[in-house]
Amino acid sequence: MNYIARQQGRFITVLPRSRKEDEQFRRRLLKKPDSVRWDELYIVTKEIISKGKVFQQTVDRLSVSAEEMTSKEGYRLLWYHSTKKVDLDSQRRARQLQRARQELMDLRDRLPGPKTRFRERSKVDVAVEEILKKYDVELLLLVDVLEEEKPTYRQASKGRPSKNTKYVKKVKKQFNICWSVDAVRLAEAESLDGIFPLITNAKPMTAEEVLRAYKRQPIIEKRFSQLKTDFSVAPIYLKSVTRIQALLAVYFFALIVQTLLERELRQAMERAKIESLPLYPEDRACRRPTTGKILDLFDGVQRHELTLPGREPEVFVTQLSPLQKQILKLLGIPEKSYGH
């Protein structure tokens, strides 16, 4: 973050849970929930058609803490609350608890087996700890390891047993586990559902603008994922850092061109009131054309140049289809100049 800020860049990201500021705010919310005032930012709705009527259903309500905080570096720290995230956090915790319980049950069934490897309590403790850590429920599940003594008897000497046969008693340790949900910790976790902190150095932006910009992250991530898919960027050996920067700059410019091409075509379709173009296989409708689909459409176009002594070069271009002509028109590219 400091490096981005020093380079005059802007950032918006989630504050890590390991930061002290995160711990302080959550503790405050647990002990004094009334001390935090939430201001509603906006509501996300979706249309639902029922019995021929259109209804608006609330999907999410997003709020921000009225008290804007500052990180130790001096950056803005904003705490948000989402009603949708409340449900998602609760569902995730329920799944994690269920999976942890299932693995604990499997472990309990393995403990008394004749070939069990859990002959020592320390091994049982490690196995339990690994399960709780795997599903991040160390604070929610209370697990007790019970140690039992199981006696076994065998003849002191060989031969057929009789009323005078002596037996040797051997005590074998056997372990069992039981667990329960910590109701207090569970209630505390539920009271913190739906909140998340964003840290940023973008001072002019409002709290709503910061949140909306952050929610565009999946779109940006999807765009950069095309470096590995459409562009097939693979590891190559470069001798200096400047060459690495130059190569990535070229790909970054390619991403910008790709983004602009998609935006220009989609905006032109909106102006022309065209809902879709038949770019998918079997001429199926494509509502949001991508650069890949556009380039695939023009992939079969060929350009030949005939050069004869003492004459101007003559250019021949594959005759364009009606769809290709339509896309060129939407992009503002004259059909006659295409390929020349």
Image (spheres, grey):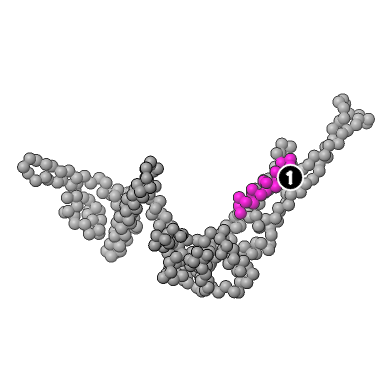
Residue drawn at point x = 31 percent, y = 58 percent: 260
Asked if the magenta segment contains residue 338, the reply would be no
Q: Residue 90 lies in what quarter of the image?
A: bottom right
Residue 104 lies, in percent from the top left, at 67, 49
Residue drawn at point x = 6 percent, y = 42 percent: 310
Residue 94 lies, in percent from the top left, at 61, 57
Q: How many marks?
A: 1
Residue drawn at point x = 68 percent, y = 58 percent: 181
Residue 142 lies, in percent from the top left, at 70, 55
Q: Is residue 123 left or right of residue 302?
A: right
Magenta stretch in the rendered image = 118-136
Name the residue nearer the viewer: 273 or 222: 222
Q: Look at the magenta stretch and give its main secondary structure.
A: helix
Residue 163 lies, in percent from the top left, at 93, 31
Q: Is residue 276 left or right of residue 85?
A: left
What secondary structure is found at the residue carrying circle 1?
Answer: helix
Q: Residues within 10 Å of mark 1 (few under 14, many from 20)?
A: some
17, above or below 247, in the image: below
Asked if the magenta segment contains residue 133, the reply would be yes
Which residue reaches farthest right? 164
Amino acid type at circle 1 is Arg
Which residue reaches farthest top? 159
Name the residue nearer the viewer: 139 or 74: 74
Residue drawn at point x = 19 percent, y = 52 percent: 338
Q: Which residue is mark 1?
A: 121
Q: Is residue 229 visible?
A: no
